[in-house]
Amino acid sequence: MELLGKVIKILINNLAVIILYVLSFYSFEGVREFPNLLIFSFNLQMIIVYLYVLKFPNHLGLGHIFLAGIINDVVVGIPLGVSSLSYLVLSFFTIYIRHATLRSRMSAEWITFIPALFFSNLVYFIVINNFSHLSFYYVELLRSTFFTFLFFPFFYYFFHYYQTRILKDNA
Amino acid sequence: MADNRDDFIIAIRYALLKKGAKQKFSLFFLISFSVLIITLDKISVPFIQSTRAVLNDFVYEVSTIVSLPGKFVSYLNQEKKNHFKIVSTNKNLKEEIEMLKRNRYNSIFLQTENNSLREALTLITANKTDSPIVANTILDQQSPYLKSIIIDKGTNQGIIKGMTVFSKNYLIGVVVESNYLTARVLLITDLNSKIPVVIADSGVNAILAGTGEKTELALEFLPNEFILEPNKIIYTSGRDGFLKAGLPVAETYLNKKNKLFIRSLADPQQAAIIHVIKGQSKQ
């Protein structure tokens, strides 16, 4: 019973890391289990990486982000390291934003998510085009990026509430 | 101006090199490591290839387990739909059976006659010895970047890169990556899939390309004057010397708005049990 309690505590404390790995193994693309809602597919990994690196860096290590990217590459079948690089570029911009921001506000962080997403996807796009022979679904990537940006506030409040109220972490 | 530039450089340096309290690696190190992996993967170093094969097997197995709850939800959803379909389908099937009974005798006669004629023309070859390998789909990744499935047979069962994959006797894809325990099948609906085909009743050759949609396909390099008609079956032409000629792949149809489309005969994303066989000649 004590062991179970410890396991549950570890799971609760490392929710972001667990979600990131599960999404990578599952190659999550939003709500693809529901074909009619496929148009709303978004990249939750990007949201988690951005949000946690920005607000709760002690709960999501860069090593985990790198490894989740590698797993995602294997599952999706693209050259190894592409997603990792994309996530790390996103992390780089996020750390820069964190360093340059004096007073954090959700609206400001939502807007700064745009350049972070742009450069992250740009790196993804450049590497795929130059290091593989894969054709690219540009429209889907654009759509996915748009909905990733659009759904950000919802997950922002969700994870913010989780970290500050449930884990009592003062970001 | 100089202060601003200094601040910018300090922020960049901080982002790249500073490790947080619980961070084991700096961002600069991980980015460099990612670039190194991409480069090694690109130049196909044998060590990386074997490592990737092991990594693939491990990740696919874990991914299969992780995707079980999702599959279960899909299964329940599908079962619910199937239940409601059965009643209407049953009625249609009864009518169809009656019609098929009438056609059966005629068909047997034509088949016998066809075999006799093929034997006479020595068209029947020793291909019968190619026994298919039955495999299960363990992962169905509907990624926006690659339409592919992962199957539970690999080089240990004789699956090699380039083998053709069928579902319910219809071509659904080609093996593009073979690991020891698993293999990846590139579906014909993927943008990267290009198959030389011939259109029934016309003998016109073309290239059947994937569109990235669920079952939609497209024909490329059709003659300018050629007008495609609905309800035509599209077969492989075997012109690439790789796929066998005469494998039914797709059909043309009119949608509700009377617009002509091409769809795959099999639904690759519904293929749970598939058959893998060798290609024609380049094995």
Image: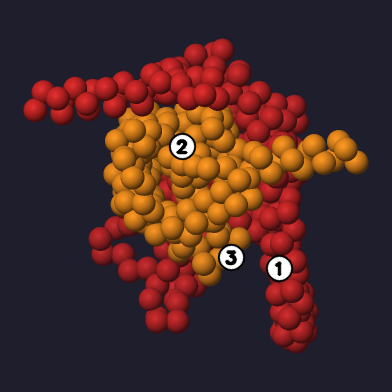
Chain colours: A orange, B red
CA gap between label 1 and label 2 equals 39 Å
Q: Which amino acid type is marked by label 1? A: Gln
Report the front residue among B223 and B86.
B86
> Are the two marked residues, 2 and 3, in contact with CB atoms closer than 8 angstroms?
no
Location of residue B193 in the rendering, given as x and y in whole percent from the top left corner: 46, 46
Place residue B277 in its image quadrant.
top right
* Mark 3 Cα-neighbour bin, 10 Å: few <14, some 14–19, many ≥20: few
Mark 3 belongs to which subunit? A
Relative vertical location of residue A167 with respect to residue B265 in this rendering, above or below? above
Q: Which amino acid type is marked by label 3? A: Phe
Residue at horizontal 78 percent and vertical 38 percent from the top: A7
* Mark 2 Cα-neighbour bin, 10 Å: few <14, some 14–19, many ≥20: many
Residue at horizontal 56 percent and vertical 12 percent from the top: B47
Residue position marked by numbered label 2 in the rendering: A53
Q: Is residue A144 left or right of residue B65?
A: left
CA gap between label 2 and label 3 equals 30 Å
Location of residue B18 in the rendering, given as x and y in whole percent from the top left corner: 41, 20
Mark 2 belongs to which subunit? A
Location of residue A123 in the rendering, given as x and y in whole percent from the top left corner: 34, 35
Count of all numbered marks drawn on residues in the image? 3
Residue position marked by numbered label 3 in the rendering: A34
Relative vertical location of residue B281 with respect to residue B203 in this rendering, above or below? above
Whether residue B5 is visible, yes or no, is yes
Q: Which amino acid type is marked by label 2? A: Val
Which mark, residue B78? 1
Which quarter shows the N terminus of chain A? top right
Residue at horizontal 67 percent and vertical 36 percent from the top: B60
Q: Is residue A27 left or right of residue B208?
A: right
